[in-house]
Amino acid sequence: MTLLDVRGLTIHYDLPQGTVRAVEDATFTVDRGEVVAIIGESGSGKTTLAMSIAGLLRPPGRVVRGHIYFEGLDLSRLDDEKWREIRGRDITVVFQDPNTYLNPLMNVGRQVAEVFEAHGMGSIRSREVAQRAIEILRRVRIQDPDKRYWSYPHELSGGMKQRVLIAMAIALKPKLLIADEPTSALDATIQAQILDLLEELRREMGMSLLLITHDLGVAAKIAHRIIVMYAGQIVEMGRADEIMSDPLHPYTRALVRSVKLDRKRLLGVPSGAPPSLISPPPGCRFHPRCPYATEQCTAWRHTLYVRDNRRVACILYA
Amino acid sequence: MVLRFLAWRGLQMAITIIGVILVLFLLVRILPGDPARLLAGPEASQEDVEELRRLLGLDRPLHEQFAAYFLSVLSGDLGTSYRTGEPVIDEIMRRLPYTLALAVAAQTLAIAVAVPLGIVAALRPRSIAGYAASIFGVLGSSLPVFWTALLLIWAFSVELKLLPSGGAGTPAHMVLPTAVLALFLMGNLVRITRASLLEVLGANHVVTAHSKGLPWNKVLTRHVIRNALVPIVTLVGVQFGTLLGGAVITETVFGWPGIGRLVVESIFVRDYAVLQGAILIIALFFMLINFFVDMVQMLIDPRTRHV
């Protein structure tokens, strides 16, 4: 059963230096209860994609083409007031850096309580709302939640703050939780705890999880399906186990190999940054770094070829 | 914890005030000119001047003068004016209400106009308020006070004959000096408000607030304006402290009998006692305001609550 259906989504940032083609023609679905990981380097457009699904795309970013269907409702055509009702209740986000995504001047309990207030369940000053916030803090395994309720962000560790952000995101049992690099600002041991917590909450609540990460290892651990993005385009998607055992796209192959050998750098491709999205290379955007590139690649138009359960955007599979 | 903070700040203030008294005492003695000669007048004989110097205690060694002064300050006696023979404290108390009234009025007006203007300018940079904020920001801090004062006197007193050009006594007398000072304060205040708000608007925790589905007005009041208040409060503290020190130029142009003019007059006649007393009171006010600003800061930002 499809929960989220993204079709041909194209997002541009209009900057004085030119138009940044952050996301081009993204098409994919997320089923109910499914964990889908979008993986890519920084600048691959994965965060822009996630923010547009959460209704948090900020100018100069704008959806140029395409649709985001959520339970059949087209989010890309929604007005602010409707969006406000969906955000925080049906679609929620856990952000990357717990240190900056919490308000330093407000105690964490009230920041959680605000979610209830925003969706008409009483003022943050009311006892019932505070009690619910405390229950949610307990749910994300914060010790002494009734004491921690009054703590300010600077009094908590990074892992604790990330739990507070998760508490906000699960408070109203959302249908879709978007986690944008939820562990990359944390220590390795805390990373595993947070991932386990997310996976456990997802299973209990039956929600879908869209995990945005640059870390294929993290994605392989909990995702059912993986979407690989490069320079604003989806280059491969399929079941997580199949992608890990048999990556098709040259970029995915390099990613999988470096994860298996536990290397930080991409293996088998020339090092270098992903291309500028203001003037991307013609044809396949990966061809300047691709070991298999031929003349044809510069004239190729981005297409996802179907191969068994897999979609792959490479001329080798045409 | 609050008690520990208060005790610590009390000690700090006591040390500061001793330092202020000492520096003031020395500074005033370094100034060129001889108060005994000035007071006695150019006609007086050398004997008369020496006699006067002895009477005023100015012939005694410096450390004795300081000890005597320090002890009398502690007992609330700021000395006697060389010029009028009156207690300094009386003179200051006569002037203080004028300075206070002008400072409170100008600061209130400046906040009432500049803060909302700065907020709107940050939210809608291309609106009328946005442009007004830019104009206030530039004019307020770049037009010299004496010039705007003269301009307003020319317009409202000379041409329109609506308001008195100087002096004190009726509320009408306050209008022009208040306007001049407020305009000056607004320049910085508008700019700080707008800059602070823009910074907070771009902060990540504001995205979190939106992601909860919080209505925009609540995002604005709870997560933007409150956070943007910290630098604004600091600036207002500094501005108000400066005003209490007497807006020397404004008070002079408008003949306003405040502390600022008292200081200037005392300098001209080398009235050490009044000068010392007035500056001491100004320093005291400054410390109290700083203390108050710190308290407000602690109220807003929990991160500053650890001493």
Image (cartoon, rainbow, N blue to C red):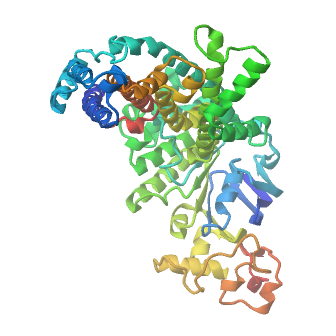
Would you say A186 lies left or right of A58 here?
A: left
Image quadrant assignment for residue B110: top right
Image quadrant assignment for residue A189: bottom left
Task: Give how far across and how far down residue A279 sits, in percent.
Answer: 77, 74
Would you say B297 lies left or right of A318 here?
A: left
Task: Give how far across and how far down residue B65 sits, in percent.
Answer: 19, 26
Relative to the observer, which residue lies in front, A236 or A47?
A: A47
Relative to the observer, which residue lies in front, B13 or B130?
A: B13
Would you say A59 lies left or right of B197 here?
A: right
Task: Give how far across and how far down residue B223 sits, in percent.
Answer: 57, 36
Relative to the observer, which residue lies in front, B156 or A17?
A: B156
Q: Total number of numbered labels?
A: 0
Question: Which residue is located at x 58 percent, y 56 percent?
Answer: A180
Instruction: Report whether residue A269 is seen.
Output: yes
Measured along the vertical axis of the image, is residue A232 above or below residue B76?
below
* Farthest bottom residue in view: A295
Q: Quadrant of the C terminus of chain A?
A: bottom right
Would you say A179 lies left or right of A52 here?
A: left
Instruction: Report whether residue B212 is seen.
Output: no
Relative to the observer, which residue lies in front, B184 or A258?
A: B184
* Farthest top residue in view: B170
Measured along the vertical axis of the image, is residue B296 above or below residue A306?
above
Question: Which residue is located at x 22 percent, y 24 percent?
Answer: B50
Question: Which residue is located at x 27 percent, y 23 percent?
Answer: B49
Image quadrant assignment for residue A83: top right
Measured along the vertical axis of the image, is residue B35 above or below residue A50?
above
